[in-house]
Amino acid sequence: MPEPQGANAIEFHNIHKRFGRVVANNDISFAVPRGTIHGIVGENGAGKSTLMNILFGIHQADSGSILIQGRPAHIKSSIDAIRLGIGMVHQHFMLVDRLTAMQNVVLGAETGFWLTGGVGGGRKRIEALQARYGLDFPLDHIPHNLSVGTQQRIEILKALYRDASVLILDEPTSVLTPQEVDILFTVFKDLKAEGKTVVLITHKLREVLAVTDNVTILRQGRCVDTVPTATVTRSSLAEAMVGRKINPVALPTATPSPRPKLSVRDLVVKGQGSMGVRGLSFDLHGAEILGIAGVAGNGQSELLMALSGLAPVIEGEIRTEHLTIDHKSTISPGGLRRGGLGNIPEDRHRNGVIGEWTGLENSILGLQRSKDVPGVGRSLNWRHIEAWCRDLLRHNDVRPPDPHRPIGVLSGGNQQKLVIGRELALEPDILLVGQPTRGVDIGAIEAIHGKLVEQRNKGRALLLVSVELDEIFALSDRVIVMFEGRSMGELSRSELSETLVGMMMAGMSKAEALGYLKQRESA
Amino acid sequence: ADPGLLYDLGGKFDRSFNENAFSGAERFKQETGVNFLEFELSNDAQREQALRTFAQNGVNPIAVVGFSWAPALEKVAKEFPDAHFAIVDATVDLPNVQSIEFKYGEGAFVVGALAGLKTKTGTVGFVGGMDVPIIKDFACAFHHGAAYTKPGVRYIENMTGPTPSAWNDPTRGRELALGQYDRGADIIFAAAGGTTVGILQAAADADKLAIGVGLNQNSLHPGHVLTSATAEVGLGIYLTFKEAQDGTWRPGVKQLGLAEKGVGWSLDENNKPLLTDDEIAKVDGIVADIIAGKIQVPSYIQTGACPAP
Amino acid sequence: MDPIQLAASTLRLAVPLIFATMAGLYAERSGLVDIGLEGKMLSGAFAGAAVASLSGSAWVGLIAAILAGGIVGLAQGVASIAFRGNQLVIGLAINIIASGLTAFLGIAWFQRGGQTPQLIEGQRFEAIHLPLSAEIAQVPVVGPLYATVIGGQTILGYAAIASIAITWLVIYRTRFGLRLVAAGDKPEAVESAGVSVFRLRYCAIFVCGCLCGMAGAYLSIVQGGAFYRDMSAGQGYMALAALIFGGWKPGRAALACLLFAGADAVQGRLQGVPIFGQFEVPTQVVQAIPYLLTLILLAGLVGRSHGPAAAGRPYVRGQR
Amino acid sequence: MTLRASSILGGLSATLINLLIALLLGGLLVAAVGADPSAALRVVYNGAFGSSAGLSYTFYYATNYIFAGLAFAVAAQASQFNIGAEGQAYIGGLGTGLACLALPGVSWWLALPVAVAASGLFSGGWALIPAVMEARRGSNLIITTIMFNFLASLLMTFVIVNLLRVPGSAIPSSGPMPESSFLPRIDQILTAIGIPTNETPLTIMVFVAVALALGLIWLIWHTRWGYELRAIGKNSDAAAFAGVNVARVKIQAICLSGAVAGMLGVNEVMGAQHRVLLELAAGYGFTGIAVALIGANHPAGIIPAAVLFGALQQGGASLSFMFPNVSRDVVVIVQGLVILLAGGLIHMLRPRLVAFFAGLLNTERSA
Ligand SMILES: Nc1ncnc2c1ncn2[C@@H]1O[C@H](COP(=O)(O)OP(=O)(O)OP(=O)(O)O)[C@@H](O)[C@H]1O
Ligand SMILES: Nc1ncnc2c1ncn2[C@@H]1O[C@H](COP(=O)(O)OP(=O)(O)OP(=O)(O)O)[C@@H](O)[C@H]1O
Ligand SMILES: [Mg+2]
Ligand SMILES: [Mg+2]
């Protein structure tokens, strides 16, 4: 690690980077002062990850230079970056599911040839670091079975284990619960207090305002501005990023349909790395959005899987107008779709799109057995489908609206716009919505929220599963809080409060939580 | 015109009948100074093509090795009535084809008889290549030969494998032979092309006896190769080339058995120490009896089954 | 069937499989799919027999075999790591080229159809007779077991057993193994942890080649006593099957090798044995035993096994 | 558009350059055995393309490679690696043989559809167990199909030697097929229209092969079933989420792959050999894997790759005829080099060439 010179931990000078014809970084220059927390914001595809990947040696800049601790750095690979004291927590975690948490931390920084005494003597050091920064995780578990928040702590510790003095985090909070975010920010502050530097990429402006010292705004590959956080407001930041004003969606009053479109009774679903669903009942009516709140891993995913026909119902039943699913009569995802169900998956990469395919091919994924898409039948008429796809891309503001581009090269937000557009296109009666805005920029969030509310207003029934409380609060007519596979109670829109929902998410029933709050108020 | 030789799929150096044929052609070349053409197949479709190419180029006579050539030869020989052809191991009844057939069973019977004489454990073994009729024929005759000199002899049989690689898998051959020795056999007859050397190797490694096939393989592991059941494929090729050169070439069927010295058992300085004069005399007696028709050698190919000895 | 002899035969048949399976384990664990085991075995077998017969020493032959396997491995590495070729195609090509080239060189150097000269005593590894074998030979079970199963193997036989233990140690107990396993599952993670995936994979494919060379040396120097064209006879593919069967784990894969070898040994001994009194089972049915056994175990016991997640995917830095 | 054009141009030129490198290396080998490489190359070219008979042989081999390549590609589009075309074709050959033997005196145009159906049924059926094991039990298809190749060899040896063999014959093959069932040969057609041509095993099956390739393009890229198949191949989780019955489509794909391999059996039994021979698939099934991979698992790539392999096979045979020193091993090595360079090392030059053409096309446009 170089001896620090000057006041800046990192300086970017005129960084350029192109991918084919896409200019990802265009003449970017700014500095990150040592011992600060630095935010980077920008729309999807603005070039944030690219810049950080250049810093970490994963990509090489086409031109421009980087100074680390005041000295010119030639970062050819991550090995160089690590040697320079840079640690990175990637947007998609770099954890190996075949290794334990501890092995993951030690990987590449082992002390000797033999892995004796707790993977090369690393155990003691890890435990010390865990204690120092409050980064709790079980050392001998496989990361795959741990919550995302825990996985992230492993990643952070991995960087600290290598004596990182600069820590880069790419959208670390997009999958975290509010509690986990709090823990994370405490860690940031501890690091800052030790003189370390933190670079934070995020789409959540609230967090930028809460925790950063300075913020850099990127737009379409260019650096718009770098300013002290104290001088900006949420709306000024948003405007700088998107280039226009952002308005929260309005939720006009609506009357839910009298008969439920979807009824779930005493549902039990086997858990996959969590407890699963353990007896859940609710009704979902037309013209309403039912929000399912809860810390990730409390059975929401299993609920969605069962409702999609991907996980068997162990007990209880799911009933729609045409179908009943219980432990005897299973139904395939195809059958459910035919029964008028739209489905926005939680995990876009895994379930929502096929990255190597073009937008055209992706635009009928899941609709391939539908009778309502022009050109789709036993044989496919791609000319007709292309016309439909162009409409879809245009109506949903997918950028670029090119049906022949592989979907994988689009930014996450644009992929998500395509998925949502596709699932809404046939106006299904019931719509399952899982984490609709994960990793999506504020402009796109506005658009997506608008689409969902529009469907509700048209009388469709929407089940919204999200770990984002903001999102739940903004969109839901009613909210069910899930904890360990059960409902902690149902709240109407007027009852919603962050403290109440937070307590229920931690495992208190609605009655207990209300009682506790009343007690506290009177005290 | 130069003569030509077309090998079967096993290729020129299969340590078996193709190689034997090659050595016959080489002998012809050395003695007469006349060159010969040759071709190794890569697949069945090349048979007709190879025959035609040779015939069109005036190669004469054209000898083919192996029964698999019969259908192709039958077709092409008709197209070139002026060319002369010879086929080993099959009969093609055409006025311009000489068919050279070996009575392999007679040779196998004789080495079987020798094995029957020599076995101390009362068990003899047989390792074949693939489970195909010609190998069954060897096996059956060998078994009968052994039972002739040692009634009630125990007989074990193995086939190396299901694909043509069975003809060229000495390591498997060795293991199968070792297995047979473990099961009590002390003499094993190998009729498995290139796999045979593995069986002979096993005999040397286990200090037991084995019988070679095709060529005289007695010298490979002296003291461990009891004898070899030879078939003079090379002689057949040599003769057909020579006859054509001398103008004495005749079409028709040549049956080469013990009487014609087309097949036989090899006796040389390598295996002499293993045999007593009495044993040699007995085997020669059996040879004479077969030639005289006093002993009938069973034929699996004809009957589709091997009668119990 | 004498169980002692059966065990000894199983071990002999298992040796080349074990070497090749361990070889494949290194390659595949590092993220390189290797169907070129066959070709590397063949190269090793040829180099081993050729050099042993020229030099007159089995040891020099063995070293040549290891080097030949290693060099072919590195070439395969360059093609699949640096040039990011399709690993299946490269493996296939290696097998085909090795089959042709060994025969070609064999004919050029030794004539006789590419067969190398028969190795004589001293040019081959002999079975090692353990001390006291003769003395306790009379003790039932233990005596023959000691003399022919525990003892009675060649040096390469013991090396094969050792290769299982060493592989286990390397994979689970060393830094190299940790990184290797990680590179096969998530190379990006290894790179972001500051370790070169390329270097790891080159190491792995080189070790793989060396072990294949040893497998080949066993075929030619010990078993065949010479090199014969295509003498590996599909064992590289069987090794691959054993590797998958054993879930890419050293111990289990070695067990799979023993299973295949055992089934093969039993098969050889069951041929022509009348079952149910006089009824003679067709040879083909007996020969099918190892394959059927594998299928039944695969369907019944093993089920879905997950190999290294990144195997077959060329690693490109920063690709998403 | 320039993107697409430059990537196609780059890919093509990379393939051609690599092919040249492979041939150059082969030339060195030929020179090493004392033959003149340029003369050898001429012999190979003339042997493969220089005469109507040579051309016919080239296309006959190509027919087999097309079938085998398509068989692999069908399943590979669903990310299923069917290594079993060899055994499936072998069993398909049995189906063909039985169909023809059961229809003595029935002319070929009636026998062909029956034989195709029988072959497809046999070979597709032979693929069914591995397919079900893969889809329902997760048993690795590579292993199971390797095992089934061995089992096919065992079964066929038994059937041919014990059931189909002409009694009293030493030849391990069935008797000849009824002459009425022989497929019309292209040389007959050529001779009839005034181009006298030697008899070759090239029959109308070559048209069947091309038609099958076109049919598969339609099936895989222009039908719902093909769409679902490809979805499984790219991301089976997403496919399941989209309502694809993953297990069923996988089984269908693998069985179809087997049935396509069976057409190789039809070509060999009804077109070329007119009997059921031992090992009638003769390794085409294995080489077909390389053909498919070089052809990027797409029929449009498989056909040229198959012709290339056919030309190598046929040209290689001419080479061995003309140069006794050049053994068939040399031909095998050159084949291996072509697979390595045109298939395995295609990325060696491709990115550079794509970039080169992209630059070229861009400057042209701006000019
Ligand atoms: N490896 C790559 N190959 C081709 N294009 C790329 C690659 N990586 C990024 N891009 C493109 O570069 C641009 C910038 O991407 P980048 O990932 O840096 O955006 P981002 O600001 O991190 O977006 P997000 O908020 O969605 O994470 C995008 O247009 C993207 O499509
Ligand atoms: N999306 C859909 N909407 C309406 N009917 C459908 C849909 N998908 C399938 N069907 C019909 O439902 C029945 C059973 O569906 P199944 O999944 O078995 O399809 P299939 O008929 O096998 O289609 P394919 O032949 O393409 O596989 C069929 O008659 C099919 O036509
Ligand atoms: Mg990003
Ligand atoms: Mg269907």
Image (cartoon, coloured by chain):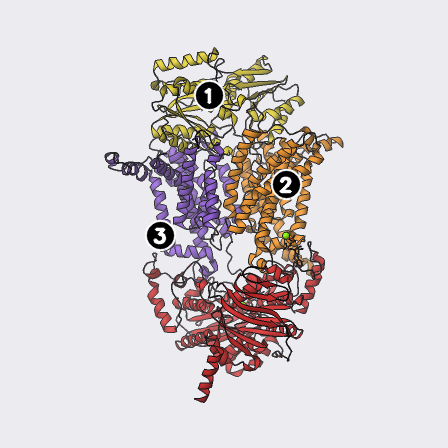
Rendered shade, chain D: orange
In the image, A221: left or right of C58?
right
Ligand 1 quarter of the rendering: bottom right
From what the image shows, is residue D131 above or below residue A169? Answer: above
Mark 2: few/some/many CA within 10 Å (<14, 14-19, 20+): many
In the rendered image, residue B219, in percent from the top left (x then y), is placed at 39, 23
Q: Give whichever of B19, C304 is nearer the camera.
A: C304
* Quarter placement of the C terminus of chain D: bottom right
Camera-nearest label, 3 or 2 = 3
- Visible in this render: residue A413? no
Q: Which chain is purple?
A: C
Q: Which residue is mark 2?
A: D307
Q: What is the C-alpha distance between the residues marked 2 and 1?
A: 48 Å
Image-based side of C57 in relation to A390, left or right = left
Foreground: B302 or B10?
B302
Q: Which residue is mark 3?
A: C169
Foreground tag (2 vs 1): 1
Q: Tell me the SS state at disc 1.
A: helix
Towards the viewer: A226 or A37: A37
In the rendered image of the structure, the colour used to display chain A is: red
- The vertical placement of A401 against A505, above or below, is above
Asked whether mark 2 lies closer than 8 Å to ligand 2, one says: no
Q: SS of the residue at dot 2?
A: helix
Q: Are marks 3 and 2 in contact (CB under 8 Å)?
A: no
Circle 3 SS class: helix
**A244 lies left or right of A58:** right
| x and y percentages locating residue B278 in the rendered image | 35, 13
- Mark seen at residue B141: 1
Residue at 65%, 69% in the rendered image: A397
